[in-house]
Image (spheres, rainbow, N blue to C red):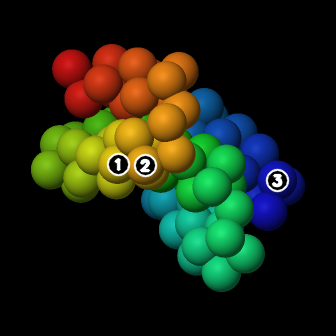
């Protein structure tokens, strides 16, 4: 999971957005299967960034809103602040 998130991040930074999206969707599914809150948050935030770079504002907002909901549910103050920042 950590390797998939790292790969997705690297692909996003290299602007290989389609590959980043595919990698991060798979990472999100794995994080959900494992119940990894940190993995879900990492994947959702990166997916939001990738969607934004692709010009898909509705998808970007959706991913960041999902991350925000998880942060609020688990009382992760820094995550809430990060998600709100990403939402504008």
Q: Nearer the viewer, residue 15 or 35?
A: 35
SS at mark 2?
A: helix
In the image, what residue occupies the spot 43% across and 49% down? 73
SS for callout 3: helix
Disc 3 vs disc 1: which is toward the camera? Answer: 1
Q: Residue at x 21, y 20 (%)?
A: 88
In this view, the residue farthest toward the right is 3
The answer to whether marks 1 and 2 mark residues whose Cβ atoms lie closer than 8 Å is yes
The quadrant of the image that shows the N terminus is bottom right
- Residue identifier under label 3: 2
Gap in angstroms between the C-alphas marked 1 and 2: 6 Å
Q: Residues within 10 Å of mark 1 (few under 14, many from 20)?
A: some
The residue at which mark 2 appears reads as 73
Binning the other alpha carbons within 10 Å of mark 2 as few (below 14), some (14 to 19) or many (20 upward) gives: few
Is residue 19 in sight in this rendering?
no
**Residue under the point 41% across and 19% down:** 81
């Amino acid at each position: 999971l950590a390797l998939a998130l790292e790969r997705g991040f690297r692909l996003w930074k290299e602007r290989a957005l389609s590959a980043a999206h595919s990698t991060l969707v798979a990472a999100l599914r794995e994080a959900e299967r494992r119940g990894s809150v940190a993995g879900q948050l990492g994947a959702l935030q990166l997916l939001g960034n990738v969607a934004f770079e692709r010009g898909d504002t509705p998808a970007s907002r959706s991913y960041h809103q999902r991350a925000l909901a998880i942060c609020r549910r688990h009382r992760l103050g820094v995550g809430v602040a990060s998600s709100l920042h990403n939402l504008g």
